Image (tube, grey):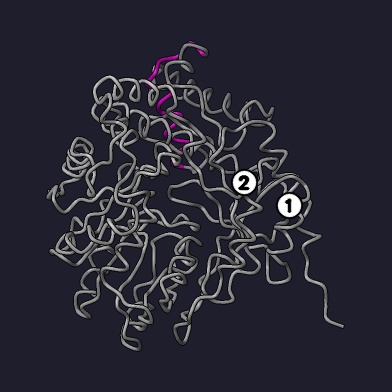
Amino acid sequence: MNHSTLKSDYLYQQVITVIRDMVEQELLNPGDKLPSLRAMASRLRVSIPTVQQAYQHLEMSGQIVAREKSGYFLQDGQQTATPQRSKLPAKPVMVNKQQLIEHVYEGIHLSDVAPLGLANPVAASSPQQALARSMRQAMRQAQARMLDYGAIDGLKMLKAQVVQYYLALGLTVNSDELIITNGAQEAIAIALQCVTQPGDIVAIESPCYFGIVELVENLGLKAIEIPVCPDDGIWLDDLSAALARHPIKACLFSTSINNPLGSQMPESRMQQLLQLLRAHEVVLIEDDVYGDLYFGEQRVRPAQCFAQPGEVLTCSSFSKTVAPGYRVGWMLAGPQSARAKRFKRALSCSAPMMNQWALADFMASGEFQRHLRQLRKRLFDNKQKMRLAVQKYFPDHVRISDPKGGCVLWLDLGDEYDGGLFFQLALQAGISVAPGAIFSAYERYRSCVRISYGLPWCDKMEGYVRTLGELVVQAKKQPHL
């Protein structure tokens, strides 16, 4: 070995030593971003390739993780168990959760509490200024037309932008089959009414977003829950068993990022799902509202990209990516478009014109994609910090999800603990969470809670998590005497 090789090895190890010293001195904490290659090279007066070699060594040993276009981050210091797999229920049920959901909804929307019970990822990185520019531009263009009723299926300018959005994903969308709605919830309601009748059985996820649970109840449908894998979406073997046993009319699944687990279905698994549903002639209603909030290298495409006409009704919105208050979503209705437009006309006639104009300009200007990149980065950083805070302040037995995207963590406090009581204790402490019982049509997940990291991270956030961790012991179930 020559002298230059010895010197190179020494410098490379020196960089690693500096990183480890920073960790020991708590100048660099788990989840934090490391200095860039250039910054570290300048600080230590070594070459960029030397720093890169050191970072790659630390990455291979699992001590740091690289994120595309974002840099290197210190890995979580602990390995924490993720939520366990639930069981496939024996039979479908009529849903009766509206009163409980209403009670919880009132609590998580109180103005004087920290809103960790709300799944509002946009709050972590709001595009307020860019939207204001788009709104002013829209007002100059539209003028008095802003105040008119719009077309039932939506503003042509906005529809054209959504069509272009799907083209970038490799999907050609017929504009006549694209319907702009008042948020994704209306789109899903229309989709369900297009393919079901009251009393029909619908397969939903388990755990499932409570808005879906309530919607199924309001439409008079029966629910059968399909357990969700914390990593890869619904368990296909459970779905296959349910389809064989019950006359399921439709499946309503998050094919991208599930709420509340944060799992993400790979495209290969998505195609298997479609093959299974095709064999049973069952329609898939895909809830794709979190599809753009992924943490991986690239977006998982919607199931619509792999489907034959009429097999999938895709529902999405701008609520989780741009502005929940705008109440603008959409559905790809396919052959159901004429029927869907009739339901849309009966429900709300049209979506807000002013908001549609502003969103059309926001997308056309390129601000939408720039905002998404920033939002994904902020949410990933928040997730890392929130998981570490939960690991630090909650008891060791608590199971924590590791979401592939979105803005929430799913916590299982353990069978001896009551998530509903934890919800009440947290409210009394000025913090909202979402109790697990509302995420199921059955009597499930009573030991679970959902908390959001979709907020600007600050010292107060860690303080909220510390308080919640201290409350866990008080949420322990009392033995029956």
Image quarter of residue 84 = bottom right
- What is the CA distance from the residue labelled 1 to the residue labelled 2? 10 Å
Left or right: residue 187 compared with residue 25: left
Compare residues 129 and 17 and report the one nearer the observer.
Answer: 129
Rendering coords of residue 222 (x, y %): 42, 79
Q: Please report whichever mark, 1 or 2, sits nearer to the chain's N-terminal start.
A: 2
Left or right: residue 351 compared with residue 385: left
Quadrant where the C terminus lies? bottom right
Quadrant where the N terminus lies? top left
Which residue corresponds to the image point at 36% horizontal and 56% vertical from the top-left?
186
Above or below, 395 relative to 354: below
Which residue, given by chain and number where applicable, does mark 1 sit on? 426
For the stretch drawn in magenta, the main secondary structure is helix
Rendering coords of residue 411 (x, y %): 61, 58
Q: Callout 2: helix, strand or loop? A: loop
Residue 460 is one of the magenta-drawn residues: no
Residue type at numbered disc 1: Ala
Which residue, given by chain and number where applicable, does mark 2 sit on? 116
Rendering coords of residue 375 (x, y %): 43, 34
Which residue corresponds to the image point at 35% horizontal and 44% vertical from the top-left?
328
Residue type at numbered disc 2: Leu
How many badges with numbers are in the image?
2
Left or right: residue 364 compared with residue 54: left
Q: Callout 1: helix, strand or loop? A: helix
Image quarter of residue 284 = bottom left
Residue 48 is one of the magenta-drawn residues: yes
Which residue corresponds to the image point at 69% horizontal and 61% vertical from the top-left?
397
In the image, which residues are magenta? 44-60
Left or right: residue 18 compared with residue 262: right
Q: Are marks 1 and 2 in contact (CB under 8 Å)?
A: yes
Disc 1 residue crowd, few under 14, some 14–19, many 20+, Cα 10 Å = many
Compare residues 118 and 71 and report the one nearer the observer.
Answer: 118
